[in-house]
Every structure is written in structure tokens, then in C-alpha cells.
Amino acid sequence: MTARPLDVTRAAARQWWPVGLLGLSSVGAYGLVLYAYSALIAPIGADTGWSVGALSGAFSLSMVLGGLGAAWTGRLVDRANGRAVMLAALAAGSVGLMVAARARSLEVFVLERRGRGRRRRKARRNTR
């Protein structure tokens, strides 16, 4: 008995749904954490009184630290369960966004951005 085309489609959908979810979560994560920052930098500066230069510096620092620690995070993903690392990065990133949203000093905001660079390395390495 041969498989009907609809059965083949359902089997493929069951097999590939994690890939689709990973794609959607990656687009959402990068959109919120990276790309939205350029749109939100002026309102953040206006609300807090921090200069655009200082806010851009915090973002740049997180990007540099993210790149510097990528190899270490890659080894962690290779040794541990990649899903667990991704989940931990998601949880830490969520807490970090809450800390940044409530930061009343530039120092706290910069420290949170620094931590975001480490979490982004974990998530980036897990998607490869």
C-alpha cells in the first residue's frame, strides 16, 4: 500500500515543526533585541536623559563581548544539550530586558547590555 500525498505532507509537517518554531523565535529575538534598539534609542534617551552616544556605546559593548565569547559558548553547546542552553539564554534574556526597562542609571543599563552579549552568543551558536 502506498502513502497518500496528504499523509506524506502531514509526516513532513510533524518532522519539520521544530525548525519552523526555531525560525520564528530567532526572528522575534533578533527583532526585539537587535533591530528594535535603533528605533528605540531616541525614546530611551529622551525618557532617561542619557546621550545617544552612551546608549550606542552600551550596544556596541554588548556586540563586542558577544563576539569575543562566541567560541566558549559554542563549546558549551557542543558539550551540553543545545536546547537547554537556548532555554537558559531565553530566560536570562527575558530577565535582562526587564532589568534594562527598569534601569534608572546608565551603569545598570550598560551592565545589562554586557550580559545580553553573552546570552546572544549562546543563542547564535545554538542555531547553527
Image (tube, rainbow, N blue to C red):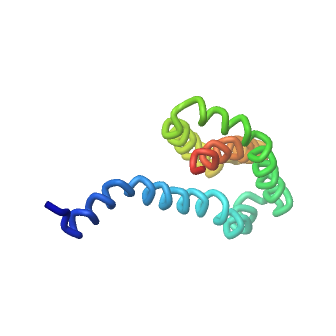
Residue 57 spot, x, y in % from top left: 83, 54
Give the residue at x 54% y 42%.
Answer: 86
| 8 displayed left or right of 100 | left
Residue sitting farthest toward the front = 1
Give the residue at x 56% y 56%.
Answer: 29
Give the residue at x 66% y 39%.
Answer: 74
Asked if one can make out residue 105 in the rendered structure from this viewpoint, the answer is: no
Residue sitting farthest toward the right = 53
Q: Quadrant of the N terminus?
A: bottom left
Quadrant in the rendering for residue 115 = top right
Give the residue at x 67% y 60%.
Answer: 34
Image: 60 above or below 115:
below
Asked if one can make out residue 85 in the rendered structure from this viewpoint, the answer is: yes
- Asked whether 98 or 35 is in front, the reply is 35
- Asked whether 101 or 56 is in front, the reply is 56
- Asked whether 14 or 87 is in front, the reply is 14
Residue sitting farthest toward the top = 79
Residue sitting farthest toward the left = 1
Residue 63 spot, x, y in % from top left: 77, 51
Image: 3 above or below 70:
below
- Asked whether 6 or 97 is in front, the reply is 6
Residue 39 spot, x, y in % from top left: 68, 70
